[in-house]
Image (cartoon, rainbow, N blue to C red):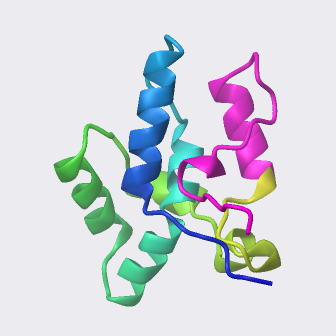
Amino acid sequence: MSKPKMYPVEEAIKAQKALRSAAGLGPEQFPIQAFVGMISDEIESLRKRGKTDNEIAEMIQQNSAIEITPQQIAENYASPEERHQHGEQSVPANCLRSAADSARPSAPGRSVALVFQFQTSP
């Protein structure tokens, strides 16, 4: 079986932005739980390099409009076991469901993992 084609998150976001614009939809919104789940690989890597959750929260706030606390990072961090189910990089299904449900009541269970994980068929 051939390796699936992968794309950087920036390209996925550009494509999603164009599609949402064409569909007359505004920017997709994520609750803090889903956001922290999406960046848990980066959190893990920074923690291994000695960064604290306070420093990570400061980095996020300095480089985006996202307001986040170290406590929110600690409470919503997805462990490697939760992120790498079945050998894939993903946010835990229960986090996706609850995050998607709270973000989009009209679309229960919609997966937010598509924002950063795309595969094409061979």
Residue 100, horizontal then vertical, whole percent? 69, 34
Q: Quadrant of residue 120 in the image?
A: bottom right
Q: Can residue 26 be seen in this view?
A: no
Return the residue found at the far front: 122
Residue located 57% across and 63% down the image = 77
Residue 72 versus residue 67 in the image, above or below: below
Of 37 and 69, nearer the camera is: 37
Q: Can residue 53 be seen in this view?
A: yes
Residue 5, horizontal then vertical, whole percent? 59, 70
Q: In this image, 71 relative to 58: left or right?
A: right
Residue 78, horizontal then vertical, whole percent? 63, 66
**Does residue 88 belong to the magenta stretch?**
no
Residue located 47% across and 58% down the image = 73
Image quarter (top left, top right, bottom left or bottom right) of the N terminus: bottom right
- In the image, the segment drawn in magenta is 94-122
Q: Quadrant of residue 111 in the image?
A: top right
Residue located 58% across and 57% down the image = 37
**Does residue 117 belong to the magenta stretch?**
yes
Of 37 and 114, nearer the camera is: 114
Residue 77 versus residue 51 in the image, above or below: above
Q: In this image, 80 relative to 42: left or right?
A: right
Return the residue found at the far bottom: 49
Return the residue found at the far left: 62
Residue 48 versus residue 108 in the image, above or below: below
Q: How many marks?
A: 0
Q: Quadrant of residue 8 in the image?
A: bottom left
Residue located 81% across and 36% down the image = 109
